[in-house]
Amino acid sequence: MHFHNLEKTLLEIYNRLLKAYGPRNWWPARTRFEVIAGAILTQNVSWKNASTAVSNLKKSGLLSPLAIISAPHKQIALQIKTSRYYNQKTAKLKNFCNYLESKYNGSLNKMFSHGAETLRKELLDVNGIGKETADSILLYAGRKLSFVSDAYTKRLLERYGILNGLSSYDEIRRLFMENIPKDIYLYNEYHALIVHHCYAVCKSEPSCQTCLVKRISRNIYCSYSNNFL
DNA sequence: GTCCAGGGCCTAC
DNA sequence: GTAGGCCATGGA
C-alpha cells in the first residue's frame, strides 16, 4: 500500500507538529520496566491517572517484576487504583512479569535481544498486552522499530483523507512503517506528537470535527489532499 | 449530573 | 473479523 506522495505528506505532518510543539521526549519514565508498567497502566485512562499509579507502585516498593509476582493481588490493586480497571490491570502486570521471569529469567536485556516483529508476537501472547501496548513497549522501552498507532492516529489520518476505509490497527501501523524513514527518533516523536496534539492541545473538543479540522487547519497544510485541514 | 481519558479481552454472530 | 459488553477512577 504505497501512495505516491504519502511519504512527503506524512513527513509534512510530522514537521508541522514538531515545529508547533517541540520534541515531547517520551517516554516519561526512569527505567525500561517503568515504561512497561506505565504502558499497561495507561490503557484507556489519562496519563495523569496512570502516572499516579506508577508512583504509588514505586513508593511501595512494587515497581519490579519479582515484587509484582510475589505481592498479593489486593496489595497491588490498592496501589494502582487511580489507573481505572485496577483489578484487570493487576492481573496484566502479573502476567507480563511471569512471562518475563519464566522466559527470560527476569532479564529485559535478554527479552529485548529479539527482533521487533518476533518479540511483538510474543508480547501479544501475554494476556493483557494488545497491539498498542506491545508497540509502546517495543519502541519506548526497547528502542525498537515498531510504530505505535492509536485512535488519535486513526482520526488524524481520516481527516486528511489518507485512510480511505483502511483502518485496522495493523494497517495504520504499516502505513507509517512502509512510508516514513525507519528511524527510532522519528517513530518516538511522531506518535508522542500526535497524542500531544490530540489530547493535550485539543482536549477541550476531543471527539469532534472542529478539533481536528479547525485547529489543525491553522497550523498544518496537507500536501497529500492539497488542502488545509 | 455528564463526558472522556495515551485499550484489551471475551463472547456472539 | 467485527460489533458490543465489560472493566470501574478522576478531572473537566
Image (tube, coloured by chain):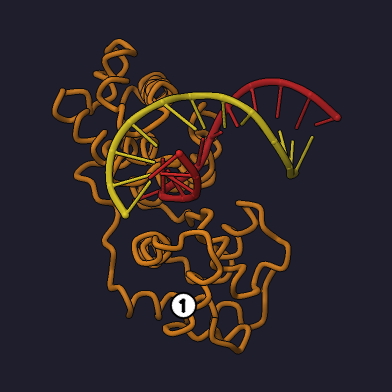
Chain colours: A orange, B red, C yellow
**Image spot of residue A91 (x, y percent):** 42, 20
> Which residue does the image show at 49% across and 78% down from the upper left?
A214
As drawn, A200 above or below A2: above
Q: Element at badge 1?
A: helix
Q: Position of residue A169 (x, y in %)?
A: 60, 51
- Residue A76 horizontal side relative to residue B13, left or right: left
Q: Is residue A110 something one can see in this rendering? A: yes
* Closest to the observer, A46 or A186: A46
- The image quadrant of residue A171 is bottom right
Residue placed at 42% from the left, 28% from the top?
A85
Give the amino acid at mark 1.
Ile
Q: Where is residue C8 in the image (x, y as percent from the top left)?
A: 41, 26
In this rendering, is residue A40 above or below A69? below
> Image point 52% across, 59% down: which residue?
A207
Q: Position of residue B13 (x, y in %)?
A: 86, 30
Residue at the (67%, 76%) spot, across then down? A3
Give the labeled residue for mark 1: A216
Tag 1 subunit = A
Query: Image quadrant of residue A94?
Result: top left
Q: In this view, does A22 lie above or below A115?
A: below
Drawn side of residue A109 relative to residue A212, left or right: left
Of residue A169 and residue A102, the one placed in the foreground of this image is A169
Question: Callout 1: few (<14), some (14-19), or many (20+) C-alpha neighbours within 10 Å?
Answer: many
Instruction: State the quadrant of the N terminus of chain A.
Output: bottom right
